[in-house]
Amino acid sequence: MFNIAKAICLLFCLSVLVHAETTLTQRDPRIIGGEVADFGDWPSTAALFVTKKGREEGSYICGGTLIAPRWVITAAHCVKGEKATNLFVWLGTTDLSDNGGGEGIKIKKIISHPQYDEATFDNDLALLELEDISNVKTMPLFIGDAEEGTPAAVVGWGARNINPLTGEGFNPSLQLYELQLPIVSQTQCKLIMEDLQNMGPVTDNMICAGTGLGGEDTCQGDSGGPLMAMQNNEIRLVGLVSWGIGCADQNTYGVYTRLNKFSKWIESSMEAESNNDSGGGTIFWMLFPFFVLLLTYKIRRIG
Ligand code: ARG
């Protein structure tokens, strides 16, 4: 009797374990792979839209990240040939459907990296100066190099399915998806990607992420969006979705703009622009002491 009870118990435990194992391995690897982000997660993630002439609504083109109250960073290839006045960003929501909330802000100026190379996607980054400041949380840049194996996260509204003929993605999502991927060493990425691709090398301005196992990757429409990792107990921006060969294929990785290489350019471009914006004010304050002197001189003479 006791043995039968033991056997039943053992069987039960085993079946629970097997079930847990299969649900874990069957979990739909979803971006390509990953899962829907919770509303309120990834607050700094921006959706970039281009307005179609004569229409109120725009169409979604790329992802981006708010790195300062007035600045979104995205990929240069996303805004190539676009006019600032035709663009806006949507911030503060994971849900791009009509009643998904969030705020839309127009773009005042596009600053693409001057050495952005269309052929190789080298230096694939652009700064978007917003017309108004956003109150959404900003994301700091990752300092130094994110090492091989660092767990990173990517998010995007990009393709969720792959065309089997072209290997390219289609069917973008109104919901933001998130996915975890490890950072890949530069040697490994060069070895794999430079063998496959016909676009140009994996340069030092690029960083790769992925498992190489297939099924999990960023894809068309995720471009410009963030590759992030933890540093000092906060999530920081490591890279920008830039390119890949197809999406989520075995033995390939996603290639991202390595932001660490551009921290100086980013800082100085934002600063130069802010100084420009307050240009009139600067001259006024420079001349202010002279006005005061002149005034006191006049008052003394009158007195
Ligand atoms: N260039 C694509 C875009 O404009 C991003 C492709 C990323 N591909 C990849 N396999 N990780 O959206």
Image (cartoon, helix red, strand yellow):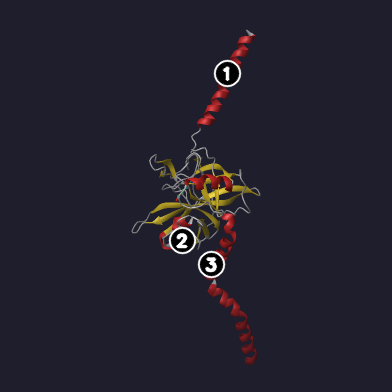
* Label pair 2/3, CB-CB below 8 angstroms: no
Callout 1, which amino acid?
Phe
Q: CA distance from mark 2 to mark 3?
A: 14 Å
Determine the secondary structure under disc 3.
helix
Q: Nearer the viewer, residue 210 or 55?
A: 210
Q: CA distance from mark 1 to mark 2?
A: 60 Å
Q: Nearer the viewer, residue 303 or 133?
A: 133
- Looking at the image, is mark 3 or mark 1 earlier in the sequence? 1
* The C terminus lies in quadrant: bottom right
Q: Is residue 242 left or right of residue 183?
A: left
Q: Position of residue 279 (x, y in %)?
A: 54, 73
Look at 60% across and 78% down and name the residue there: 286
Query: Which residue position holds label 2?
Result: 107
Look at 63% across and 92% down and name the residue there: 301
Query: Which residue position holds label 1?
Result: 12
Callout 2, which amino acid?
Ile
